[in-house]
Image (cartoon, rainbow, N blue to C red):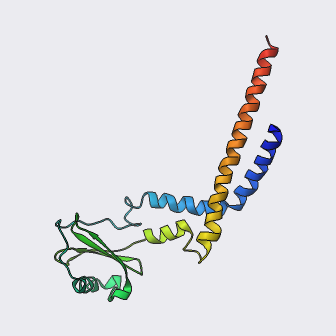
Amino acid sequence: MSASLRRISRSLHLWVSLGIFIPVVIVIGSGLLLQVKKEVDWIQPPTQKAAEGAPTLSFAEIIDAVAQAPEAQLTSWDDIDRLDVRPSKGIIKVRGNNHWEVQLDATSGDVLQVAYRRADTIEAIHDGSWFFEGAKLYVFLPAAILLFVLWITGLVMLVTTLKSKYRKHYYQSKRHR
């Protein structure tokens, strides 16, 4: 039974690994980039620091301040995806739908930094949603499940191989006595 289990496991392991090769390479590559996003400014702009404290800017002042950064092209609330308020750093990060980020001093409204943010795109590539509507659910989720199957078949091959090597070694040592 051990040999047939190993043979089935090996065959399943081979064909599943070929089937999920591309999605797994994409997940691993983008995951590596996401691991270092705080260390690589090209991926995610570094967070600036201003005077700590509660923000005093109104929403109207925020939109006026980000409009002062023409390269970001954020002129109305329709252009803005989210605000990230960091009272401990005294800043407000304004992220646009176009992936530009403007960091503002939370009390004065001064523009501290304007930069393109690639981390969100890399995250979308990582989870599959960047490719097409159903890729996340119908390509990357099955690939993750099949990767788990690869792990199990790999364990089966490891255990059955070690077991047969142990048996072989055991019987050889008995014959030489």
Q: Residue 69 placed where, x, y %?
A: 28, 83
For the C terminus, which image quadrant?
A: top right
Q: Residue 14 placed where, x, y %?
A: 75, 53
Residue at position x 71%, y 33% in the image = 162
Q: Is residue 151 left or right of residue 42?
A: right
Q: In the figure, residue 106 lies in which quadrant?
A: bottom left
Q: In the rendered view, tell whether residue 43 sits above or below residue 65.
A: above
Q: Exactly how many numbered labels are in the figure?
A: 0
Q: Residue 18 placed where, x, y %?
A: 72, 58
For the N terminus, which image quadrant?
A: top right
Q: In the figure, residue 137 lies in which quadrant?
A: bottom right
Q: Is residue 130 left or right of residue 171?
A: left
Residue at position x 73%, y 27% in the image = 166
Q: Residue 120 placed where, x, y %?
A: 44, 71
Q: In the rendered view, tell whether residue 82 sits above or below residue 53.
A: below
Residue at position x 21%, y 68% in the image = 90
Q: In the rendered view, tell whether residue 131 sits above or below residue 173.
A: below
Seen from the viewer's position, the closer of residues 63 and 46 is 63
Q: Residue furthest front?
A: 1
Residue at position x 32%, y 89% in the image = 75
